[in-house]
């Protein structure tokens, strides 16, 4: 009879402790955390890397204390590891339920988020839009997080597009706890399928993970002080800039020979005054113990916070996500269906290339007034699926599909009607095109534009 020894190791995939069986013969087997089959310990990592690509076979994560990863010496090797772990920290036994209107969603969302009367944001987020029949099966949550992330970037951050943004110097928002709420929303969005905050300047991320300021004119962009830095660099005589330089805290000689010290003083002033806002964001990031994990694994998580050129979906990505239910090949119906798919691709490419002014999306601004903004491919994707971003997990991105149906019989059901709009279900990621009303590209564009503008809510148009 052999003496079996049970050992406990840390699973690389879910960062939770699992038991392995080691026999006296030296053979070690462990259970795959996904499919629960036994494999040799030296092979289970390779197996789980493929097994984990299918969400269908993956069991639901049970919430575990976030200290499992923080206290372990096991490093996070990739964004995928980090996001998988983070999704398992959500307390699915409780709901953080917000009932909100679409009007002035960002300001209302911040207020309701901070109230936290019956639950906290570490629970499963559930969203209900006032006056709508939609049931949140993840689409409403993703739409809410998409709008909140866009609002945070627009109202709480500032900077040049594409170069990253830094927190606004706003003592009012700081005193009202808006930056701390923004940090919590960052954490919840990453954990529960929302977009990543890919708009921070590099020095902001460095401060979050190290607490230090990495001052360099190459990684700091400020609408006010970057202009002063440019003027100092280009000026041969700094006399006209003395007041602006002194106001930034520089106490040395204002001469061309001291340009380097002057520029450093300006950059320090631009960044130091925003550190209270960043510290409040760090307080919010303590949700799920996320801040400690970021500080231990900054290189693996950096891409989730810094701007990325390919982060937003384009027409090619959206077309690749389509899964059309086509009629028999060569039939008249199939020809019409292919024509409609071509119309849809042309429509998306037109949005990218020309940004036509006649295609607009309606939004309620901070004052509750209707304002028009240019339509874009991410807007269309959000209309179809509830989210305007590519799925963060590679496994989810591979399975992200939008099913396309074609309705050829609307005139038979309703003889004599003249207008029939596409039917969209963001929860199931489906769209149904009425083929009889989409005979030309102009008709397709007008109908889709009208459906988008008037059919953003969860109801029948």
Image (cartoon, rainbow, N blue to C red):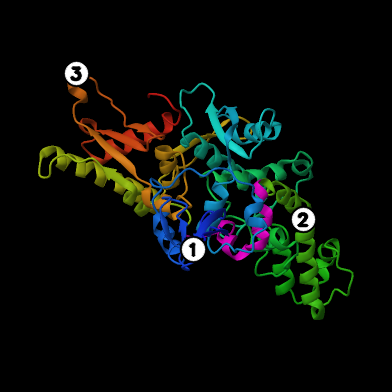
| Up-down relation of residue 107 to residue 76 (above or below) | above
Neighbourhood count class around disc 1 (C-alpha, 10 Å): few under 14, some 14–19, many 20 upward: some
Camera-nearest residue between 326 and 454: 326
Q: Quadrant of residue 100?
A: top right
Q: Along the polypeptide, which appears first: circle 3 or circle 1?
A: 1
Residue ID for mark 2: 275
User: In the image shown, does 436 or 83 lie closer to the viewer?
Assistant: 83
Name the residue carrying label 1.
23
Main secondary structure of the magenta stretch: helix
Q: Are marks 3 and 2 in contact (CB under 8 Å)?
A: no
139 within the magenta span: no
The residue drawn where x is 70% and y is 52% is: 167
Give left or right: position of 103 versus 212. Answer: left
Element class at badge 2: helix
Q: Estimate the spatial distance between the alpha carbons at disc 2 and disc 1, rounded to whole Å.
A: 55 Å
Q: Nearer the viewer, mark 3 or mark 2?
A: 2
Q: Position of residue 261 (x, y in %)?
A: 80, 74
Residue 198 in percent (x, y) is at: 57, 55
Q: Does label 2 or label 1 sit earlier along the sequence?
A: 1
Q: Secondary structure at mark 1?
A: loop
Asked whether the residues under the numbered discs 3 and 1 touch, taking CB atoms below 8 Å apart as contact, a structural biologist would say no
The residue under label 3 is 415
């Amino acid at each position: 009879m052999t003496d079996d020894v049970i050992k406990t190791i840390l699973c690389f995939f879910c960062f939770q402790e699992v038991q392995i069986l080691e026999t006296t013969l030296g053979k070690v087997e462990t259970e795959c955390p996904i499919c629960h089959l036994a494999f040799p310990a030296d092979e289970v990592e390779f197996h789980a890397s493929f097994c984990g690509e299918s969400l269908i076979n993956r069991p639901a994560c049970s919430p575990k204390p976030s200290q499992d990863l923080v206290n372990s010496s096991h490093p996070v090797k990739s964004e995928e590891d980090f996001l998988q772990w983070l999704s398992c920290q959500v307390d699915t036994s409780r709901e953080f339920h917000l009932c909100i209107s679409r009007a002035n969603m960002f300001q209302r969302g911040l207020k309701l988020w901070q109230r936290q009367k019956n639950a906290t944001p570490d629970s499963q987020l559930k969203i209900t839009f006032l006056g709508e029949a939609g049931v949140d099966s993840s689409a409403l949550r993703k739409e809410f997080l998409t709008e909140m992330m866009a609002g945070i970037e627009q109202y709480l951050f500032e900077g040049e597009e594409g170069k990253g943004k830094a927190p606004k110097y706003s003592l009012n928002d700081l005193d009202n706890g808006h930056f701390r709420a923004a940090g919590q929303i960052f954490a919840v969005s990453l954990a529960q399928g929302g977009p990543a905050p890919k708009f921070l300047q590099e020095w902001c991320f460095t401060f979050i993970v190290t607490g230090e300021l990495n001052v360099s004119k190459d990684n700091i962009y400020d609408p006010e002080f970057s202009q002063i830095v440019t003027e100092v660099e280009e000026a041969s005589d700094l006399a006209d800039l003395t007041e602006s330089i002194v106001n930034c805290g520089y106490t040395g000689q204002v001469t061309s020979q001291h340009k380097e010290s002057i520029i450093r003083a300006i950059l320090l002033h631009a960044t130091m005054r925003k550190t209270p806002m960043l510290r409040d964001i760090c307080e919010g990031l303590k949700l799920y113990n996320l801040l400690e994990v970021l500080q231990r694994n900054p290189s693996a998580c950096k891409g989730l916070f810094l701007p990325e050129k390919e982060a937003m979906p384009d027409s090619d990505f959206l077309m690749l996500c389509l899964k059309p239910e086509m009629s028999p090949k060569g039939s008249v119906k199939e020809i019409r269906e292919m024509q409609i798919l071509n119309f849809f691709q042309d429509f998306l490419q037109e949005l990218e290339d020309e940004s036509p002014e006649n295609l607009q999306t309606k939004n309620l601004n901070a004052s509750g007034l209707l304002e028009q903004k240019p339509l874009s491919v991410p807007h269309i994707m959000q209309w179809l699926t509830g989210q305007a971003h590519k799925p963060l997990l590679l496994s989810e991105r591979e399975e992200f599909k939008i099913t396309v149906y074609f309705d050829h019989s609307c005139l038979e059901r309703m003889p004599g009607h003249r207008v029939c709009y596409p039917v969209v279900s963001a929860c199931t990621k489906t769209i149904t095109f009425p083929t009889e009303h989409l005979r030309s590209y102009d008709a397709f564009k007008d109908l889709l534009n009208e459906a988008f503008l008037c059919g953003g809510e969860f109801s029948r148009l």
